[in-house]
Image: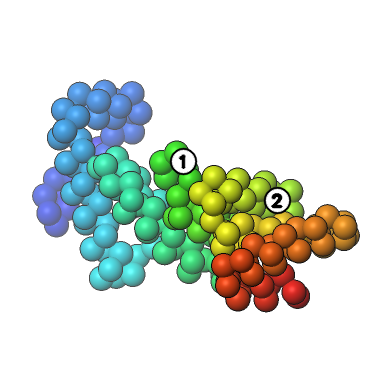
Amino acid sequence: DERVEDWGFSYTFYNMQLKKYIYYNIDKDERKDFHKKAAKILERLHELEKRENIDELVYHLVLSGQKEKAVEYLILHAKKMEYILNAEAISLWEKAYELLDEGPSKKKREILISLGNLLIAEGENDNALNVFNQVLNDANILNSNKYIAIAKNAIGEIYIRRSQHEKAEKFILEAQKSAKNIGYLDGQLNSIY
C-alpha cells in the first residue's frame, strides 16, 4: 500500500513474511541504528507532546541496545500508573524487572519492592510473597539489613492478611531486629504497626 504523506511516500506492508524478510535482510548494525533513531523520535514525542506510547519506546530502546534507558522509562511510567491503574503499573514493573541483568542489585530490589507492594494492594498475596522472598534472598546475599527489614516487614504483613499471626510475628520481630542493628528508623516503625 503506497500513500503520499507530508514527508513523502509511505509504504505499508500487510504480509508478515514480507515484513520479516525485509527486516532481517537489513544489516544488523543498520537495524540497531534504525531502532536508535526511532527511539530518539519517540523520546522527543514523549517529552514534547507527553505521549505515553511506552511500549513502542521501550521496544526500540531495547533493540538499539539501550536497556538501562528502557528500564528507567518503565520505572517512571510505572510510578505514574500506581495511583491510577494498579494492573498497568504491575505490568510495567514486571517488564522493568525482566530487562535487568541477572544477579542481585539495588535497582532490582527497588523494582521488586514496588511490584510487591502493588501486589499486596491488589490482594495477590501469593505473588507478593514470592516477590518479597526474592528481595529477602537478594538482601541476604548482599548482607543488606535495610532490605532484609523491608522484605521481612512485607512478608509479615502478608501473613497478617492471611491471619497467620505466629508467622507474621516471627518475620516482624526479625525485621525490627535487622532495622535496629543499622539504625533504620523507617524499618523499625514499619515493624511496630
**Image quarter in which the N terminus is found:** top left
**Residue 121 shows in the view:** no
- Residue under label 1: 103
Q: Amino acid at mark 1?
A: Gly
Relative horizontal placement of residue 15, taking residue 149 as reference (left or right): left
Return the mark for residue 152: none
Question: So how many labels did they put on this image?
Answer: 2
**How far across and how far down the image is residue 82, in percent?**
55, 67
* Outermost left residue: 8
**How far across and how far down the image is residue 109, in percent?**
52, 54
Q: Residue at x 69, y 64 (%)?
A: 177
Q: Amino acid at mark 2?
A: Leu
**Image quarter in which the C terminus is found:** bottom right
Position above or below: 82 against 18: below
- Residue under label 2: 129
Position above or below: 164 against 191: above
